[in-house]
Image: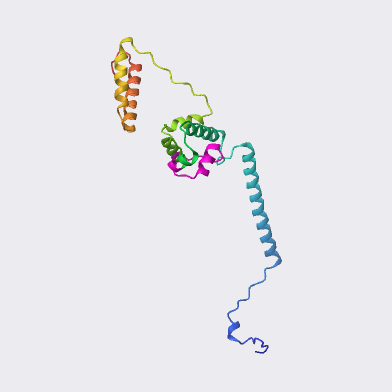
Amino acid sequence: MGNSSIHPSDTSTRNVVDLPTPSGAGIMARIAEQEDRAGRLTQSLEIQRRRDLMGTNQRSPTSSDSAVGREIRELRRAQGRTQKELARMVGVTGAQLHRYETGTTRIAASRLIAIANALDIRPDVLIAAGSTRDVAAPVMPAFPADSGDDIVELIQAFGSISDPKHRSALVAVAKMMAAQYNRHPSGQAD
């Protein structure tokens, strides 16, 4: 095969498109556009960096996340379970559970509920651990002297209800009745 040259009338070169060479003004406009984009990106990154330094990044774990994680670890250890066992029960890896317990990863509400169920506790126990306010312990009401047997019977009946929804419904009814009684202590309705 020898050295051949392509002739302008050759059909194989007719499909080649000549692209226009951008003018100096076009190049300058593209450079200005790229500089503007870079400036906006730099500004966005600076805002993100400030949020991280101030601890206001809404996606970053907070002190509440760490407190919830510590509570999970304490409850797990108290039950004699390993991270791997609890992780398997919850459906995450041991490494992910470790990140939850150390507070380096935030816990989604659905995962928090799964962890609480695996630990056989109510989710509000874990949520309370992450609360930043001091929550006062509930005040025990004063009961009439002759209500001892009724209270025992009520607790036994409540304890025999296995469905959590039915228990919640019973508590809601009791609260509603107590609120009604507190508005009208004589027992008469509105």
Q: How many marks?
A: 0
- Left or right: 13 as drawn, with respect to 185: right
Q: Is residue 146 visible?
A: yes
Report x, y in % for residue 122: 42, 31
- Locate residue 23, reporting x and y percent: 69, 68
Q: Is residue 190 visible?
A: no
Q: Quadrant of residue 99?
A: top right
Q: At 58% from the left edge and 85% from the top edge, which residue is drawn?
A: 11
- As drawn, 19 above or below 190: below
Query: What residue is rendered at 64% in x and 50% in y?
Result: 41
Q: Residue furthest top?
A: 145
Bounds of the magenta segment = 88-110
Q: Is residue 153 magenta?
A: no
Q: Does the magenta stretch mainly form a helix, a strand or a loop?
A: helix
97 or 81, nearer to the observer? 81
Pinpoint residue 68: horizontal percent, then vertical percent: 51, 33
